[in-house]
Image (cartoon, coloured by chain):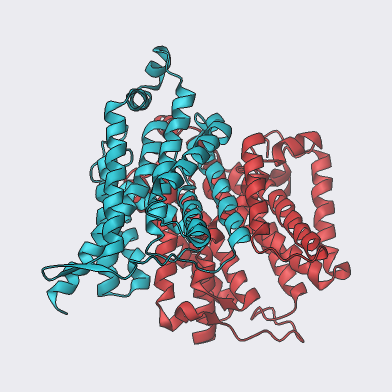
C-alpha cells in the first residue's frame, strides 16, 4: 500500500514529505497560540482546496460555489449537535451524506443537460446563493441572526464532542489534511483518476474512447462535495458561530479556490503549497500593516487578487510544478 | 391588496429591469464578440457608481447628466483593461479568463472598500421623491428617467452596431474570427473597443442605478451574478435577449419582493436561471450554441 502510494516519488520527495510532517506534528510543542491559529487556517485551506481540486483539478469542472458544501457540512453537524446532542463525528456522516447528495444532484442536473464550462460555474454560484438566502430565512437554524454552538471549555479537551484547545483542533485539521492528501493520491492513481484527467483534457475524446463521462463527472462532483463538507463541520465546531451571510457567501467560495490555483490545480501538493504561501503571506502583510499602525480592512483581499492575477498571467499552471522541478522533487506523473 | 399595487410594482420592476438590461447588455456584447465572460462586470459598475456619488457629493452634478462622462471614463478603463490584461487570454481556456477577471473583481471590490469605506452611500436629488400619476398608476420619477435613459443608450448601441463601420467590423470579428483577420481587420483593437463599449454600457447603467439603490463596495459580486442571470436567461450574445432578460428579472424581483419578503427576492431570479439552464440553455432569445 505504502509502496504503491509513493510509487514514482523520488527519495528526496519522500524525505521532504516526512520532514514536513514531523515538523507539523511537533508544532504545538513550540508554537504559540497565534502561530497555531495561522497553521490551522493554512491546513483548513489546504484541505478545502484539496477537496475542490478533485472536481476542477482532476475532472476539469469549475465550481465557484463550494461554499455551499462547506455551509451544508457546518449547518448539518451543528444543528444535530445543538438540537439533538449528536456528537460531531456522527454528525459528520450526515453532513457528508447530505452534501454529497447535493453535489450529486447539481452534477446530475448540469451534466445531464450538457451544462458545462462557464455555465456550470454560474450554476454552482447560483445554488450557493440560493442556499445562502434560504438559510437566511430559516429560523430553526437561527436565520440571518446566526446559529451558535455552546462555547468551548478550553480547560479540558473533549475530542469526541470537538470541544477543546487550539492544539486539539490543530491535530484534527492536520489529520484531515493528511487523510485528504492520501485519498487524493489514491484517487489520482486509480482508474477513475485517469478517466477524470482524460475528461479534463478533452471530454469529446474521452467519450470516444468509451469513458462514461457523465458517470465519472458525477463521481467527481459527489466526492468533492462530500470531502468539502468535512471542512464545514470543522469550521462550525472551531468557530462556534455560523452566519449564512458568511459561510455561504460567494467570497468564501472564491477564497477556497485561490490556494489550489496558485499552488497548481490538478496537482496533489499544489493546494497545500498554495495555502501556505497565501495564508502565510497574507498574515505577514497584516502583521506588517499592524506594525505601521494601519488598519486596512480590504488589504488582504486586494493582496489575494494581485497574487491570483500574477499567477494566472505568469505561471498559469501554478507555482508548484516549476518549484518541484527546481527542487528536483517531481514525480514521473508530474504530481 | 388592491390590484393597483401589483401594477405599480410591476411597472417599477419593468423600469428597473431596463437598467438591469443595459448592464447585462454590456456583458452580452463582450461575450458575443470575444467569447470572454467578464466576471468583473458588476464590480466595474460599482466603480461607475462611486464616480457618480463622488461627483454628486463634491460638485452637485446630477448622475443623469453625468451618464455620458461616466460612461466615457469606463470606456477608457475597459479599453485599457482589455488591451493591457485580457488580450493575451483571449485564446486561453475559458476558466483561465474567468480566474483572471475574478482577480480583477476582487481587487476592485476591496480597492473601493479601502478608498470609500464599508458604509452605504446614496444620492438624493431634488426629484428623488417625485412621482407621476397616470390613471391609477403611480410611477416613480427617478425610475422613469433611468429606464428611459437606459432605452436611449441601448438604442444608440444598436445603431452603432448596425450602421457604423466600426460596429460592422466588430460584428465581422464576432461572426468569423479568421475571416476578420484575413480581410485585414485589426482584431486586437476591435476587441479592445468591444470591451470598452461593454464597460461604457455598465458605466451608464451604474450612474442610473445609483439614483435608487444604496451603494456599498461589496455590491459588485451580486450585480455580476445578476448580469449573468439576465444574460443567460435572455441568451448569451443576444442584444435583444439581454434587455428582455433584464425586464423579466426586474419584474420578477419586484413582484417577489412584494409577495414574499424583499430579502428573498433574488432567490426567484436564481430559480429562473436554474430553470433556463436546464430546459433552454441557449436562453430565451439566444441561438443554439455550438
Asked whether A38 or A312 is in front, the reply is: A312
> Residue A311: which quarter of the image?
top right
Asked whether A236 or B147 is in front, the reply is: B147
Say left or right for B170 vs A245.
left
Q: Quadrant of the C terminus of chain B?
A: top left
Q: Colour of chain A?
A: red
Give how far across and how far down residue B266 sits, in percent: 35, 64
Give the residue furthest to the front: B59
Asked whether B200 or A56 is in front, the reply is: B200
Give the residue furthest to the right: A30
Give how far across and how far down residue B137 sits, in percent: 15, 68
> Residue B159: which quarter of the image?
top left
Residue B279 visible (yes or no): no
Residue shown at 48% from the left, 37% from the top: B94
Q: Colour of chain B?
A: cyan
Give how far across and how far down residue B2 sits, in percent: 14, 78
Residue shown at 80% from the left, 42% from the top: A13
Residue B244 visible (yes or no): yes
Say left or right for B187 vs A310.
left
Residue shown at 41% from the left, 55% from the top: B63
The relative height of residue A257 versus residue B5 in the rendered view (above or below) is above
Give the residue furthest to the top: B183
Give the residue furthest to the left: B135
Q: Quadrant of the N terminus of chain B?
A: bottom left
Query: How many marks on residues?
Result: 0
Residue shown at 30% from the left, 59% from the top: B16
The relative height of residue B130 versus residue B191 in the rendered view (above or below) is below
Give how far across and how far down residue B95 sits, in percent: 51, 40
Amino acid at each position: 500500500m505504502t509502496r504503491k502510494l509513493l510509487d514514482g516519488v523520488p527519495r528526496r520527495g519522500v524525505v521532504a514529505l516526512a520532514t514536513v510532517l514531523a515538523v507539523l506534528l511537533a508544532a504545538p510543542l513550540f508554537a504559540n497560540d497565534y502561530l497555531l491559529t495561522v497553521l490551522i487556517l493554512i491546513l483548513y485551506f489546504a484541505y478545502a482546496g484539496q477537496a475542490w481540486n478533485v472536481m476542477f483539478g482532476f475532472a476539469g469542472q469549475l465550481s465557484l460555489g463550494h461554499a455551499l458544501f462547506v455551509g451544508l457540512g457546518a449547518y448539518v453537524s451543528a444543528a444535530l449537535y445543538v438540537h439533538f446532542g449528536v456528537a460531531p463525528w456522527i454528525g459528520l456522516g450526515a453532513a457528508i451524506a447530505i452534501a454529497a447528495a447535493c453535489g450529486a444532484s447539481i452534477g446530475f442536473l448540469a451534466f445531464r443537460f450538457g451544462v458545462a464550462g462557464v455555465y456550470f460555474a454560474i450554476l454552482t454560484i447560483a445554488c450557493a446563493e440560493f442556499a445562502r438566502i434560504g438559510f437566511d430565512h430559516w429560523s430553526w437554524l437561527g436565520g440571518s441572526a446566526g446559529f451558535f454552538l455552546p462555547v468551548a471549555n478550553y480547560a479540558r479537551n473533549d475530542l469526541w464532542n470537538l470541544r477543546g484547545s487550539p492544539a486539539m483542533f490543530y491535530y484534527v485539521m492536520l489529520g484531515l489534511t493528511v487523510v485528504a492528501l492520501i485519498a487524493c493520491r489514491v484517487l489520482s492513481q486509480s482508474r477513475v483518476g485517469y478517466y477524470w484527467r482524460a475528461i479534463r483534457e478533452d471530454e469529446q475524446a474521452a467519450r470516444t474512447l468509451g469513458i462514461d463521462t457523465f458517470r465519472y463527472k458525477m463521481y467527481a462532483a459527489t466526492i468533492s462535495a462530500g470531502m468539502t463538507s468535512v471542512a464545514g463541520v470543522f469550521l462550525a465546531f472551531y468557530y462556534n458561530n455560523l452566519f449564512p451571510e458568511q459561510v455561504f457567501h460567494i467570497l468564501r467560495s472564491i477564497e477556497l479556490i485561490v490556494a489550489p490555483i496558485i499552488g497548481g490545480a490538478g496537482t496533489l501538493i499544489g493546494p497545500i503549497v498554495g495555502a501556505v504561501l497565501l495564508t502565510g503571506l497574507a498574515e505577514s502583510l497584516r502583521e506588517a500593516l499592524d506594525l505601521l499602525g494601519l488598519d486596512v480592512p480590504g488589504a488582504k483581499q486586494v493582496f489575494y487578487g494581485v497574487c491570483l492575477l500574477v499567477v494566472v498571467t505568469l505561471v498559469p499552471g501554478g507555482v508548484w510544478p516549476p518549484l518541484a522541478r527546481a527542487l528536483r522533487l517531481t514525480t514521473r506523473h508530474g504530481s | 391588496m388592491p390590484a393597483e399595487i401589483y401594477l405599480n410594482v410591476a411597472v417599477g420592476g419593468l423600469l428597473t429591469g431596463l437598467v438591469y438590461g443595459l448592464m447585462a447588455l454590456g456583458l452580452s456584447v463582450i461575450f458575443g464578440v470575444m467569447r470572454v465572460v467578464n466576471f468583473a462586470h458588476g464590480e466595474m459598475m460599482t466603480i461607475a457608481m462611486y464616480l457618480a456619488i463622488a461627483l454628486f457629493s463634491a460638485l452637485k452634478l446630477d448622475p443623469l447628466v453625468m451618464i455620458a462622462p461616466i460612461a466615457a471614463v469606463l470606456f477608457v478603463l475597459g479599453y485599457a483593461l482589455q488591451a493591457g490584461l485580457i488580450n493575451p487570454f483571449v485564446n486561453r481556456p475559458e476558466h483561465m479568463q474567468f480566474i483572471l477577471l475574478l482577480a480583477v473583481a476582487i481587487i476592485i471590490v476591496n480597492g473601493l472598500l479601502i478608498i470609500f469605506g464599508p458604509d452605504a452611500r446614496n444620492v438624493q436629488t431634488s426629484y428623488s421623491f417625485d412621482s407621476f400619476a397616470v390613471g391609477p398608476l403611480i410611477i416613480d420619477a427617478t425610475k422613469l428617467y433611468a429606464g428611459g435613459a437606459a432605452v436611449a443608450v441601448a438604442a444608440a448601441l444598436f445603431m452603432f452596431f448596425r450602421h457604423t463601420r466600426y460596429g460592422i467590423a466588430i460584428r465581422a470579428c464576432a461572426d468569423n474570427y479568421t475571416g476578420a483577420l484575413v480581410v485585414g481587420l485589426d482584431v486586437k483593437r476591435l476587441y479592445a473597443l468591444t470591451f470598452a463599449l461593454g464597460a461604457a454600457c455598465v458605466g451608464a447603467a451604474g450612474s442610473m442605478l445609483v439614483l435608487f439603490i444604496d451603494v456599498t463596495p461589496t455590491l459588485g459580486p451580486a450585480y455580476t451574478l445578476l448580469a449573468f442571470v439576465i444574460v443567460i436567461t435572455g441568451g448569451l450574445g443576444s442584444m435583444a435577449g439581454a434587455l428582455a432578460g433584464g425586464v423579466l428579472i426586474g419584474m420578477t424581483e419586484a413582484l417577489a419582493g412584494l409577495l414574499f419578503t424583499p430579502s428573498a427576492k433574488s432567490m426567484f431570479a436564481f430559480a429562473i436561471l436554474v430553470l433556463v439552464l436546464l430546459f433552454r440553455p441557449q436562453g430565451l432569445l439566444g441561438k443554439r450554441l455550438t
